[in-house]
Image: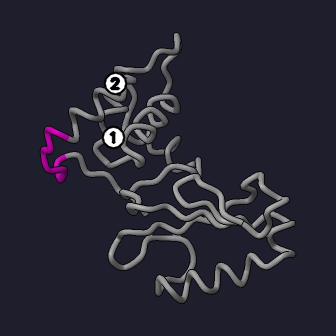
């Protein structure tokens, strides 16, 4: 569970500057909580807890309202990703052609169970319902480059 206590947040001016830049750089005519969170994640590759608080201020909402949006969507990350992101396709074609064996080998190599970061924080493992490369199945993507 993710609890936000504004008074517990250390002042990180560089991070806050990046978050504010992300929020202020939105170009669409209607700025929403969702668009603001997406802008932060697009720039930082995750939404830090400071991003929740800054989005609340920016949108004139409570941190609870912002958190309710952020926690609803499963694509938001709240911790920094690894240096490399590995997506393993788990779509029907990849599943039938060996995705589980790939997942098992990655788990063993990274010494993790399920999605997440390697112990050294360098690799993030994610499952993807479809990478759109069924002809290459089973496939993975490393930093959005597909291998199969």
Q: Give left or right: position of 121 versus 77.
A: left
Q: Which mark identifies residue 95?
A: none
Membership of 9 in magenta stretch: yes
- Image quarter hosting the C terminus: bottom right
43 over 140 or under it: above or below: above
92 over 119 or under it: above or below: above
Residue at the image position 52 percent from the left and 55 percent from the top: 143
Q: Give left or right: position of 98 versus 10.
A: right
Q: Position of residue 95 (x, y in %)?
A: 81, 73
Q: Position of residue 108 (x, y in %)?
A: 54, 89
Number of other residues with Cα within 10 Å of mark 1, as a class: few under 14, some 14 to 19, many 20 or more:
many
Number of other residues with Cα within 10 Å of mark 2, as a class: few under 14, some 14 to 19, many 20 or more:
some
Q: Position of residue 132 (x, y in %)?
A: 77, 51
Quarter of the figure with residue 86: bottom right
Q: CA distance from mark 1 to mark 2?
A: 10 Å
Mark 1 or mark 2: name the one nearer the start of the chain.
Answer: 1
Membership of 87 in magenta stretch: no
Q: Position of residue 125 (x, y in %)?
A: 53, 69
Secondary structure type for disc 2: helix
Q: Give left or right: position of 58 versus 91.
A: left
Q: Which mark identifies residue 58?
A: 2
Quarter of the figure with residue 51: top left
Residue at the image position 45 percent from the left and 36 percent from the top: 37
115 over 42 or under it: above or below: below
Residue at the image position 47 percent from the left and 82 percent from the top: 110
Near-viewer residue (63 or 144) = 144
Secondary structure type for disc 1: helix
5 over 39 or under it: above or below: below
| Residue range highlighted in magenta | 7-14
Query: Pointer 1: what residue?
Result: 51
């Amino acid at each position: 569970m993710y609890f936000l206590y504004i008074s517990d947040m250390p002042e990180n001016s560089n991070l806050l500057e990046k978050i504010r830049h992300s929020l202020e750089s939105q170009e669409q005519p209607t700025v929403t909580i969702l668009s603001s969170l997406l802008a932060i994640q697009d720039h930082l590759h995750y939404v830090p807890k400071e991003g929740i608080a800054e989005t609340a201020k920016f949108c004139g909402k409570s941190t609870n309202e912002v958190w309710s949006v952020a926690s609803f969507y499963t694509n938001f990350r709240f911790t920094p990703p690894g240096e490399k992101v590995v997506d393993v396709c788990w779509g029907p074609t990849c599943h039938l052609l060996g995705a589980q064996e790939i997942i098992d080998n990655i788990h063993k190599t990274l010494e993790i169970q399920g999605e997440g970061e390697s112990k050294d924080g360098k690799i993030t493992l994610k499952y993807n319902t479809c990478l759109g490369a069924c002809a290459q199945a089973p496939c993975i993507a490393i930093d959005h480059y597909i291998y199969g």
